[in-house]
Amino acid sequence: MHHCRGLILAGGLSSRMGSDKAALRRNHQTMEDFNRELLAALGLDVVVAGGASGIRDLIPGAGPLAAIYSVLHTIKPSALLVLPVDMPLLTTTVLGVLLEEGEKAGVPVCYEGCYLPLYLPVTQSLRDYLDMAFTEGSDQPRSLKRMLAALNGRQLPITDANALLNANTPEEWQRVVRMLDDVD
């Protein structure tokens, strides 16, 4: 059993999509349920940030870092496997590599140029970084890329580029769903 928790980021505004991405249907299930199943298949307990039933952002509208910050203030995981809710071709294989590499290395791990999904060990350095980023008056950029650099994160070569496609607009969603039909 992993001490890592699966974190689904479902708190975005979905403004480019025009509807809640977590509720989009991939085959016969919502994207949130699809992500829950992926994480459960890896043996991880699931936490959702944002959305109707998820952990609320302590700093609304501040993106993925704020969601991670809020989750760490609500629960005490030893690590997180962070997924965006909008990658309908994501696989347990792609996530399993991140989990395995991250647990071995003890540092944040993502794929090259693709900051989500992300394995994120919860260390004092991470907590300090987030506390600084969300201190009143801080001008520190709130980006996953900056956080990974500060925490000596590793980027793995991409082995399945399609699995990392995300859908932010109705057009992108339709394209990815067509790809899904080709796979099934």
Image (spheres, grey):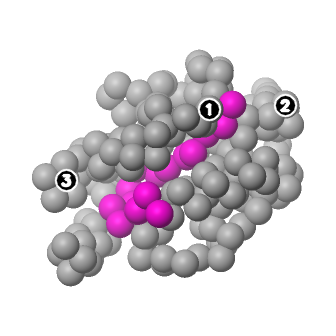
Front in this rendered view, residue 90 or 11? 90
Mark 1 residue element: loop
How many labels were placed on the picture? 3
Residue occupied by mark 3: 25
CB under 8 Å between discs 1 and 3? no
Q: First in sequence: mark 1 or mark 2?
A: 1
Magenta residues (range)? 78-93
Vertical arrangement, residue 80 with respect to residue 170, above or below: above
Query: Do the CB atoms of the residues marked 1 and 2 lie less than 8 Å apart?
Result: no
Question: Which residue ends up furthest to the front in the rendered image?
Answer: 1
Q: Quadrant of residue 51?
A: top left
**Where 6 sits versus 88, above or below?**
above
Q: Tag on residue 3?
A: 1
Q: Residue 108: give x, y in percent of width and height.
A: 73, 51
**How far apart are the alpha carbons under marks 1 and 2?**
16 Å
Residue in the picture at 85% in, 56% down: 152
Q: What amino acid is found at the position of numbered circle 1 in the picture?
A: His
For residue 97, above or below residue 178: above
Q: What residue is pinned by disc 2?
A: 124
Q: Earlier in the sequence, mark 1 or mark 3?
A: 1
Residue at 82 percent across and 43 percent down: it is 139
Left or right of residue 69: residue 160? left
Distance between the alpha carbons at the discs numbered 1 and 3: 30 Å
Report the mark closest to the observer, 1 or 2.
1
